[in-house]
Image: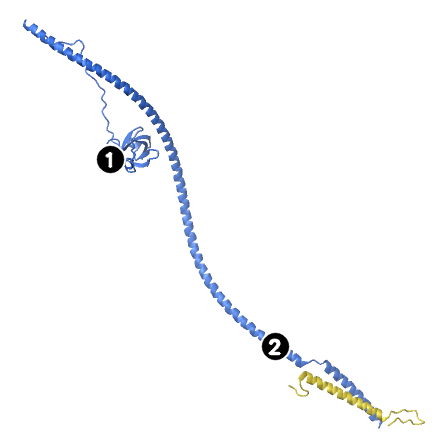
Chain colours: A yellow, B blue
Amino acid sequence: MSPVLKSGSKKVTAADNLYTVVLAVAFFVVLATSVFVAYQCYSQYGTIFKIQ
Amino acid sequence: MSTLTKVLIVLLTIASIFLCGIVVTYVANADNYKQKFENLNRSYQAAKRNEDNAKTQLNNTIEEKDRTAERLKEQIASLEGQITQLKSDLATAERERDDANRKVNNWAAIVMDFSKTIENNEKLVKDALTERDMKEAELIKQSKELKDTTAALMENMAIVKQLQEETKRLLEEKAELQSKLDLYLQQYGKAAPEPTPVTPAQEVVGLRVPPVDIDLNGTVTDVDLKNQLAEISIGEADGVREQMRFHITRGDEFVCDMVVLDVWPEKSVGWLDLLGDQQQDQPQVNDRVSTNL
């Protein structure tokens, strides 16, 4: 998906790959956050989900 | 892809990033409650052990305090007994001190009396010595007079003997003349009258002083052999006078004589005469004194 420039119109539209990248960024951010939170929980409480 | 999908993708991404940032910030800044719990738990255990130690020390301290209190009570009781004993000792010591003070005062008075007595005795001794010297001088004078008198007496006795012989011779001549005169007058039947001496015979008159038996008796109450003085139990009220001589006897034995130097109403003091060297020849208290043996 490359940007499509239509002649005669001045509206610029992004390619669909850009949104895929945005989603990927969002996914990795969420994943990194989850890993960080899991690490913190494990390091502080010794478990990830179990409540002692 | 529709515009709505794109908008949702963008919003979802922004929301995810925002929420993840918040979560990361929160988790990074959140307190480590497990570590806090462990720290607090260790602190609690340590405090509990400290509490146990403190309770143990408190109990030990209380027991020690009780033992100390018991020991102190025993010491207090003992000390109270000692205080009572010391109070009684103090009272006894005070009584003894008062008695000693009284004795000291009495002895001081006695010493003063003795000092006065010693002064009087010294004065008496001086007077006695002076009088003894005078007596000795008088005795020497009388001895000298006695010698002169004895010599004169011997001379007079020789004269008397001579006169007696002369008298005897005259009496013999008188008897012879009387016998001759009687023979001569017998021839004429006469007798010679009794001759009358021209000088009348004088009767010898002598001064005769009848002895006075005053017969004073007493006892020796004090003796000072160092100064040869003695004190007797009779005085002026009994008829004792100065220079009166008493005989001191013990049983049937004569001890010595005492010449009175000073007289008080109830007692007398004199110096000892004819004092022997032996112990039994020296006067003692309770010996008998009398003017007549």
| Three-letter code, disc 1 | Glu
Q: From mark 2 to mark 1, how far is it between C-alphas? A: 119 Å
Q: Quadrant of the N terminus of chain B?
A: bottom right
| Eye-nearest disc, 2 or 1 | 1
Q: Is residue B266 visible?
A: no
Is residue A50 toward the left or the right of residue B88 in the image? right
Q: Which mark is residue B185?
A: none
The answer to whether residue B111 is above or below residue B60 is above
> Which residue is tagged 2?
B44
Badge 1: few (under 14), some or many (20 or more) residues near its Cα, within 10 Å?
few
Mark 2 Cα shell of 10 Å, populated few (<14), some (14-19), many (≥20):
few
Dividing the picture into quarters, in which one does residue B247 lie? top left
Which residue is more in the foreground, B262 or A29? Answer: A29
Numbered disc 1: secondary structure: strand
The picture places residue B227, in percent across and down from the top left corner, at 35, 33
A23 sits to left or right of B257: right
Q: Quadrant of the C terminus of chain B?
A: top left
Circle on res. B253: 1
Along the viewing direction, whichever of B215 and A1 lies nearer the viewer: A1
Whether residue B181 is situated above or below residue B146 in the rendered picture: above
